[in-house]
Image: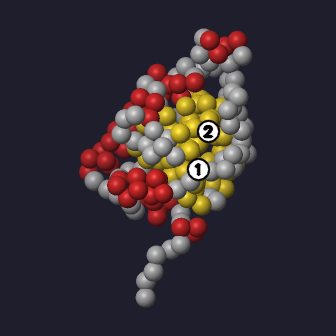
Amino acid sequence: MHQADPIQYWQVPHLAALDYDALLDLFKSLDSPAPGEVSGEYAGIDYLGQTEETFEAALGRVKAGNGVFWLGKGFPGEEGDGASGYNRLRQPDGTVARCDRFGVHRGTSPIDGKETLMLKYSDYDNGAGSIGFLDEIRKVNDRLFLCTGTPEEGTAKPGFFFLAGPPAPFRGVDDPQSELLHAGAEA
């Protein structure tokens, strides 16, 4: 007799198999990771959805990268007080850039009003920050996180991505002086 896998054993395909509404319901049911729990470099997986439209949108994101491919995110294991993380991007020559910074904060989710771990791109001067991109992280299990990415500081319709571990060590952004906002450059 078949039975569902307990969530503590879920892996990326368990999430990828869900439709948008099921992912949103699951996201709302999950708790934020504990302070400091998300630390290191995690593999990132974009949610492709289950329709031609969502697959086409994902393909568009890949093509827009012109050979640059998103690998995941890095986290310092700290929150607030200037804590920042970054995205890991594979370049066409095979090197990995650590850039597209975000502030790491604890806050109230615009999606469901629960406490959440927020990645706030508008803390930095980059493309995602210019549109007020806000990511949120919820814990599925010790190796898997369900995340949303939403423009307009979290008020638009969220998209989904997944972070999977175990993480590699945190290395830090390539250029610590890059992407600073003019007011934050003095800090």
Task: Where is residue 153? Give x, y as percent.
Answer: 46, 30
Residue at 63% across, 55% down: 165
Task: Where is residue 157? Give x, y as percent.
Answer: 36, 39
The mark found on residue 106 in the picture is 2
Left or right, 157 with reference to 79? left
Task: Where is residue 87? Give x, y as percent.
Answer: 58, 36
Question: Can you say which quadrant of the picture contains the C terminus?
Answer: top right
Residue at 48% across, 57% down: 29
Label 1 environment density (alpha carbons within 10 Å; few <14, some 14–19, many ≥20): many
Mark 2 falls on what kind of element?
Answer: strand
Label 1 near label 2: C-beta < 8 Å? yes
Residue at 71% across, 38% down: 78
- The image quarter containing residue 81 is top right
Q: Amino acid at mark 2?
A: Arg
- Observer able to see residue 169: yes
Question: In the rendered picture of this protein, how many numbered marks are placed on residues?
Answer: 2
Does label 2 or label 1 sit earlier along the sequence?
1
Q: Which residue is mark 1?
A: 32
Label 2 environment density (alpha carbons within 10 Å; few <14, some 14–19, many ≥20): some
Disc 2 to disc 1, C-alpha distance: 9 Å
